[in-house]
Amino acid sequence: MTKPYDQHCPIAMTLDVIGERWTMLIIRDLYFGRARFNDLLASSPGMSTKILSERLKTLEAHGLVERQVYSAHPLRAEYHLTDRGMSLEPVLNAIGMWGGQNLVDPKDAPALFAKIEAMRPQNRSLASDTPGA
Amino acid sequence: MTKPYDQHCPIAMTLDVIGERWTMLIIRDLYFGRARFNDLLASSPGMSTKILSERLKTLEAHGLVERQVYSAHPLRAEYHLTDRGMSLEPVLNAIGMWGGQNLVDPKDAPALFAKIEAMRPQNRSLASDTPGA
């Protein structure tokens, strides 16, 4: 694990939990409904199985993710955000909105954000905040 | 520089700009008024001069930070967030609020957040959102 910043600052403390490389992308994918290890792995080319496994364990240890075994033979598990994990939604939204407003090609933004809104968990639409909507 | 995620996703695109280790803490310090290289360095024990220099150059290249020389002999510069850099305020706020609500000891939160609010740039108070206020 990366050395924590260990600063008495709420921004640094949050980043000590979710700021490691790949972690926010894993949280993003769990938020949007990916639940299986191999689906999470496939979503982020360049992320190794070892890193994904470590990141999920860290997120579990912080109470943000829970692992549910749904088949014993063969062993199969799914990963879901806990309520505490779902409370990161404003962080995901702020990061995504900034990218949508500053980095996405404006001509691509409406289609991209429509796709993202369609993938959101139920009752969590942000349609009124969507750039280009 | 860390390899970019290179995903067509506004969250991943944002993290390719501000997601490297130390970068958000540098943006935090610039937002709260630290402007000199040595002050930024002192704020984050464990961050090397080389890393700080690289991170500032990356932020300048993305138009988030500007470097202003205020003395030629000896050469002295200050760093400030541009308007584009200041537009990251909702990201800083979301990350800080989550930490304040989930990681800071509740008995420390009111004093810590009062101190943070007092350091904010003028006219940017979030007093009504402050946990424990």
Image (cartoon, coloured by chain):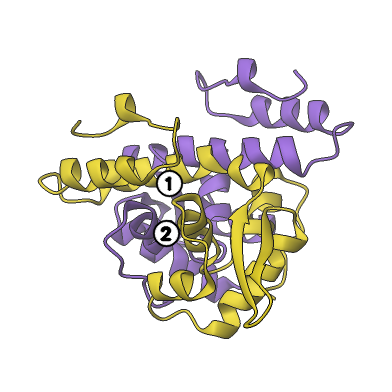
Chain colours: A purple, B yellow
| B33 and A59: which is toward the camera | B33
Which residue is pictured at 65% across the width and 79% down the height?
B75
Is residue A45 in sight in this rendering?
A: no
Q: Residue A15: which disc?
A: 2
Q: Residue B95: which disc?
A: 1
Q: Helix, strand, or loop for circle 1? A: helix
- Give amino acid for label 1: Ile
Q: Where residue A45 sits in the image (x, y, percent)?
A: 72, 64
Q: What chain letter is assigned to the residue under label 2? A: A
Which residue is pictured at 44% across the width and 70% down the height?
B39
- Which quadrant would the C terminus of chain A be assigned to in this image? top right
Q: In which quarter of the image is residue A127?
A: top right
Q: Where residue B113 sits in the image (x, y, percent)?
A: 26, 43
B27 is higher (above) or lower (below) than A50: above
B66 is higher (above) or lower (below) than B22: above
B44 left or right of A42 in image: left
Q: What chain letter is assigned to the residue under label 1? A: B
Do discs 1 and 2 share a chain?
no
Is residue A119 in sight in this rendering?
A: yes
B29 is higher (above) or lower (below) than A100: below
Q: Helix, strand, or loop for circle 2? A: helix
